[in-house]
Image: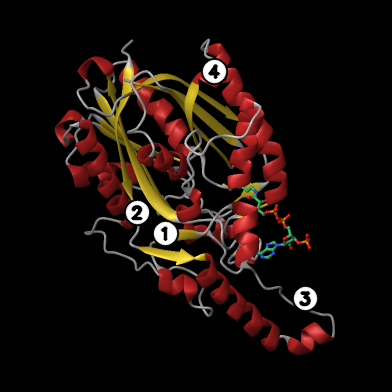
Amino acid sequence: MHNVVISGTGLYTPANSISNDELVAAFNAYVQQFNADNAAAIASGEVEALNESSSAFIEKASGIKSRFVIDRDGILDPQRMTPRIPERSNDEWGILCEMAVVAAKEALERAGRTAADIDGVIVACSNLQRAYPAVAIEVQAALGINGFGYDMNVACSSATFGLQAAANSVQLGQARAVLLVNPEICTGHLNFRDRDSHFIFGDAATAVIVERADQATSKHQFDIVSTKLATQFSNNIRNNFGFLNRCAEEGIGAVDKLFVQEGRKVFKEVCPMVAEQIATHLQENNLNVNDVKRFWLHQANLNMNLLIIRKLLGRDAEPHEAPVILDTYANTSSAGSVIALHKHQDDLPSGALGVLSSFGAGYSIGSVILRKR
Ligand SMILES: CC(C)(COP(=O)(O)OP(=O)(O)OC[C@H]1O[C@@H](n2cnc3c(N)ncnc32)[C@H](O)[C@@H]1OP(=O)(O)O)[C@@H](O)C(=O)NCCC(=O)NCCS
């Protein structure tokens, strides 16, 4: 068994961003139009009037101020409220592949590696753009990597589950190094007409190089001390989009073919599970939670993260202990905790302990204990 490190991370951030005010203006224009178009039915009680959204609510309930997106115009058009991402020919790299490659190149550079040093590619994300071939194999081809590639989906926990898979391969000698990428176009599966959730997601891609500790040369290394995964079935975050949809015409276009959630229940049920998992994981490795210098938590909701840290430490976190990126990125599903890691790691001294943790649909929870080399 080889010891394994993360030797480089990378990030792709879309060029466009949407503020809460811009998003709310588009949503409220849609609401006003809907209520005007349905005035008679609303007056007779047949149709319920829609309520407007508010930036103040969004920031207070979630901590989100803005989000990066692949396409602004389609989302902000009250007649459309869906990003416009044109189809590409099979001879062009797909958009997920393109995002993944940008993040991967930065991760390779920080790791001091080239495609020739990588033996496997894992694309781990919430939504894959097609059934097959695997996007990972496309990324492999785009970067000129030999070996193997496969896709996996564990929703918001895809990155931590992917990290365990990558670490296992390297530990067992099946690969010298593995590239893990998390391309997330969350706006593609967000219902921008749903007041409860239209503000939640943004787009981004992250990449991580996992390699043998005895071969790593980069200045940005973290020992992967341990990984721990847990799942527990829940319908509280769900998306019923899939290849069987066409076999049931009655459901085509229904709102359950996009992201739906019971946000309150998720909040209440998931926070204790995450705190318990991280505490247990540290104990199992004879590590004290107070010795952890940084928690790179999943970036869905600021209040969730504050509560999880309070449960773990018995006090509020200092801002540097649990960095926040969801204020400008919103929830980028599996990419979120890796963005936090990518942007908030270079100040840590050698030997510092950190925990990367994700949580989301499934429910699925992952924690990865890291030690700066
Ligand atoms: C989604 C979430 C931000 C909503 O926050 P919340 O505090 O639970 O808000 P609620 O849905 O209970 O709504 C509270 C009130 O605000 C209202 N409200 C909801 N959306 C609103 C909006 N966009 N603008 C203004 N008001 C809104 C509700 O109607 C409700 O009003 P009421 O009290 O009069 O009934 C929060 O539940 C959350 O983030 N949960 C965890 C989600 C998560 O992590 N999911 C993982 C996804 S991978």
Numbered circle sitting on residue 68: 1
Q: Tag 3's secondary structure?
A: loop
Residue 42 is situated, as x and y percent measured from the top left of the image, at 79, 83
Are dots 3 and 1 in contact, CB under 8 Å?
no
Q: CA distance from mark 4 to mark 3?
A: 50 Å
Sooner in the amino-acid sequence: mark 1 or mark 4 = 1
Residue 18 is situated, as x and y percent measured from the top left of the image, at 45, 66
Q: What residue is pinned by disc 2?
A: 13
Quarter assignment of residue 26: bottom right
Q: How many marks?
A: 4
Quarter assignment of residue 220: top left
Q: CA distance from mark 2 to mark 3?
A: 38 Å
Q: What residue is pinned by disc 4?
A: 282
In the rendered image, the vertical position of residue 230 relative to residue 9, given as above or below: above
Q: CA distance from mark 4 to mark 2?
A: 32 Å
Q: Amino acid at mark 2?
A: Thr
Q: CA distance from mark 2 to mark 1?
A: 7 Å
Q: Amino acid at mark 1?
A: Phe
